[in-house]
Amino acid sequence: MTKAEVAKLLMEKTGLSRNQSFETLEYFLESIKKALLEGEKVCLVGFGTFYMKEKKGRTGRNPRTGAAIVIPSKKVAAFKPGKAFREEVNKPSSA
């Protein structure tokens, strides 16, 4: 699902205009990004938690030459689904 599709669903459900739904979605996503960059966790009860995680540096190999290279440490955004969401995803399908 793309950002445009999410904005369209928001528009249909809320009655907002197309521009208002895009602005609302952008504000929501920017709020999450800003909180993560400030080191905060974003907990959406029933859905999950977004947080920043530190990946340690390590030694890797260049696949072409086989030479050892240093891969520096970095921060990455991570998501942990909430219990209700995990249960919904893992619910057996009734076919």
Image: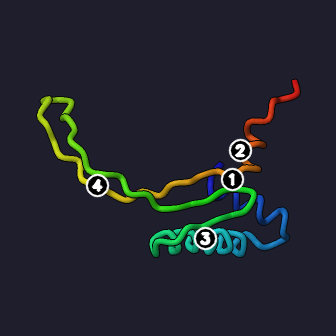
Q: Nearer the viewer, mark 3 or mark 2?
A: 2
Gap between marks 1 and 3, in whole Å? 23 Å
Q: Looking at the image, tell me whether mark 4 or mark 2 is earlier in sequence order.
A: 4
The residue that mark 4 highlights is: 73
Q: Secondary structure at mark 4?
A: loop
Find residue 86 and name its label: 2
Q: Nearer the viewer, residue 65 or 26?
A: 65
The residue that mark 1 highlights is: 82
Query: Is 31 positioned to the left or the right of 39 in the image?
Result: right
Please rate how many residues cluster around mark 3, counting C-alpha atoms within 10 Å: few if below 14, some from 14 to 19, many from 20. some
Tell me how the rendering is colored: rainbow
Q: Looking at the image, tell me whether mark 1 or mark 3 is earlier in sequence order.
A: 3
- 3 shown above or below 25: above
Under mark 1, the amino acid is: Gly
Q: Nearer the viewer, mark 3 or mark 4?
A: 4
Please rate how many residues cluster around mark 1, counting C-alpha atoms within 10 Å: few if below 14, some from 14 to 19, many from 20. some
Q: Nearer the viewer, residue 72 or 95?
A: 72
Q: Residue at 38% x, 57% y: name it.
A: 54
Under mark 2, the amino acid is: Arg
Gap between marks 4 and 2, in whole Å? 30 Å
Gap between marks 1 and 4, in whole Å? 27 Å
Q: Are marks 3 and 2 in contact (CB under 8 Å)?
A: no
Q: Looking at the image, tell me whether mark 3 or mark 4 is earlier in sequence order.
A: 3
The residue that mark 3 highlights is: 26
Q: Nearer the viewer, residue 62 or 6?
A: 62
Q: Are marks 1 and 2 in contact (CB under 8 Å)?
A: yes
Under mark 3, the amino acid is: Glu
Q: Looking at the image, tell me whether mark 1 or mark 4 is earlier in sequence order.
A: 4
